[in-house]
Image (cartoon, helix red, strand yellow):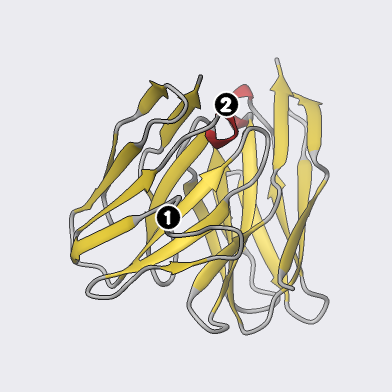
Amino acid sequence: SAVISQKPSRDICQRGTSLTIQCQVDSQVTMMFWYRQQPGQSLTLIATANQGSEATYESGFVIDKFPISRPNLTFSTLTVSNMSPEDSSIYLCSVGNTEAFFGQGTRLTVV
Amino acid sequence: EDKVVQSPLSLVVHEGDTVTLNCSYEVTNFRSLLWYKQEKKAPTFLFMLTSSGIEKKSGRLSSILDKKELFSILNITATQTGDSAVYLCAVASTSGTYKYIFGTGTRLKVLA
């Protein structure tokens, strides 16, 4: 299993600003996944972050809105840019090829 | 389009009851089906199923997969208030890139 440290745990942000979420894994992993969970909804994959290449975004998500960095095999960041209240969600990073392990999640509220 | 559908969406039971949660899927390049429990933010892993008909069991929880009919069930016996959570079903797919497709979840509330 992998231990994933995600921060911040929660934040309240003003609309129009940006927030960067960090995810640190205790072992080297090839792929890291970023999910969004809107209130009352299930997890939706935003993008897959591979070290040394650009992230692969799912339909409906774009790099300008959700830029991702993956500088090495244990770390990744997701930025939520130019936030609006509709971005209020839980954001989760995840790793794993056989079973997905999750960070503690970031609860974002945009006001 | 790949999809994972869970039912019921929500369920309220009393302590001691047995519940069955359902998960059906239509996913190309199926690799495995996973069950998670989500109480606050981070889902915690319960089971991974790859073969049909083999029951996985952990205490009062058990799960089984039917790859012919494309569904799985999660059973919880003698429910306790601590079982109250959202239960998520996910399917791992290797179609194109490797990824997990999550169902909508079943919100279980166990009353004392």
Is B34 located above or below residue B107 in the figure? below
What is the number of the mark on residue B82? 2
- Image quadrant assignment for residue B84: top right
Q: Nearer the viewer, residue B60 or A62?
A: A62
Residue at point 57%, 83% (across, down): B95
Residue at disc 2, secondary structure: helix
Q: Residue A62 location, x and y as percent?
A: 49, 59
Is A41 located above or below residue A58 in the figure? above
Q: Is residue A1 visible?
A: no
What is the number of the mark on residue A64? 1
Q: Nearer the viewer, residue A52 or B49?
A: A52
Q: Nearer the viewer, residue A21 or B105?
A: A21
Q: Quadrant of the N terminus of chain A?
A: bottom left
Mark 2 or 1: in front is 1
Q: Residue B55 location, x and y as percent?
A: 64, 66
User: Which amino acid type is marked by label 1?
Assistant: Asp
Residue at point 49%, 36% (across, down): A90
User: Which amino acid type is marked by label 2?
Assistant: Gly
